[in-house]
Amino acid sequence: MNYNTYFDTHIQALKDSGHYRYFLEVNKSAQHFPKFYFQDSDGVKQSAINWCSNDYLAQSVHEEVISKLSFAANRAGVGSGGTRNISGTTTYHKELEDTLAKLHHKEGALLFSGAYLANVTTLSTLGKLIPNLIFISDERNHASMVEGIKASKNQKIIFRHNDIIHLGEILASLPFDQPKVIVFESVYSINGNIAPVPQVAALAKLYNSLTYIDEVHAVGLYGEDGGGITSLHHVQSEINIINGTLAKGFGVIGGYIAANQNIIDAIRSFGSGFIFTTSLPPAMCAAAIKSIQLVQGNPELRNQYHQRVKLLRQIFSLHEIPFLNNESHITNILIGDPSLCRKIANKLLHESGIYIQPIFYPTVPQGEECLRITLTARHTQDQMEALANSLRTVLDDLMPAKHKATAYG
Ligand SMILES: Cc1ncc(COP(=O)(O)O)c(C=O)c1O
């Protein structure tokens, strides 16, 4: 076998399909966020406004979070130097897990390098611990949950996206004593749909099912204390396992689960992706604790953020820019063609200094290529107006017939 030819052929096929990914090198500026710098193809320094960051509350550039990070790094060093079991559990890790448990009104929490790993490890370990456990999974679940379920090798049943009736039918078809877990997200990362969490919790109770929710795009942003959609609806105790990230609403890095102590202890004791990897840097844990404290105690930050999402959408509507009308903070413009999607994004970047990374397969199914727009707490109204104006111009130019409408969905 010629390995080089093998890889070259695969990459060329990906390029031909229009799905090849090009990374923009973002020279991030804490001072000017969401503005950043980059070099164009001629090597000339340019600036642009980032409209696709998940640093929703701009916590990654919060002065107190940055200070805490450097203070703790000076005290504790950079890397932890060990797995959790072998000297890698510092006082910062313990304090962060306690903070997360409290945030989600749970007995315990467990840290991972990221929420991706938390999903893969927890779901695959659940399946191994309960061999005849059936996963009942939303069809739009994130790749990390899909991978975790696949790795467990347990049976999986897919329910239609956010379709509570279909979910109920599946649950009703299974024996009451059959071990089962409903796996879903609270805020879906790309289309921004919000799951009917209280209804899912009620069905789980009725049919004796465990529940596993990914609150990655909701923590920090929803609920009085920023605990996510489970906090918004006060159903933390009705969902068995809550997964979250420290890397989006909290602006740092790392992922976690929060649950009853016996579940936490089981994943801590049997989860490969928890056991066999170096723990998070202590200073990152310190920064995350600071960030959570700031966000948790500031409901006004959340209120203002959601008001500004509304304002952005009003501005879009005035410019007849069609977007998926969900109830979350994620604004999605469906393009439905990878080359066109890339062309639009390139034009926005190079002609208007607006950065929106086009979203392709496998992040979305083919034909659902889109522009996923995320507001942060630091975007100004002028930047919103500029975004709407530029989008209108580019859409008129590249897809005039299709893209003039108001919100849909
Ligand atoms: C729904 C969802 N879950 C999990 C993850 C992984 O989170 P992390 O970046 O903390 O690994 C992501 C990442 O974007 C996500 O969108």
Image (cartoon, helix red, strand yellow):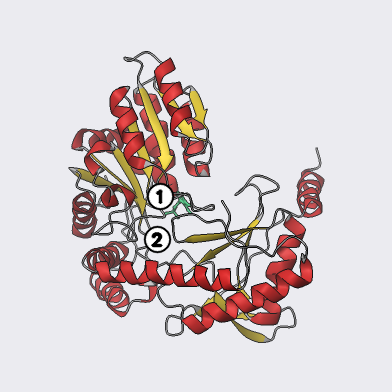
Front residue of 375 and 293: 375
The amino acid pointed to by label 2 is Ala
Mark 2 lies on residue: 247
Callout 2: helix, strand or loop?
loop
The amino acid pointed to by label 1 is Ala
Q: Specify which label sits upstream in the sequence, 1 or 2.
A: 1
Marks 1/2 in contact by CB < 8 Å: the verdict is yes
Q: Quadrant of the N terminus?
A: top right
Mark 1 lies on residue: 115
In the rendered image, residue 40, in percent from the top left (x then y), is placed at 69, 80
Please give the name of the residue rendered at 76% of the width and 59% of the height, measured from the top-left corner.
339
Say whether residue 271 is visible: no
Mark 2 sits near ligand 1, with its Cβ under 8 Å away: yes
In the rendered image, residue 191, in percent from the top left (x then y), is placed at 54, 52
In the rendered image, residue 175, in percent from the top left (x then y), is placed at 37, 13
Mark 1 sits near ligand 1, with its Cβ under 8 Å away: yes
Alpha carbon separation for disc pair 1 and 2 = 9 Å
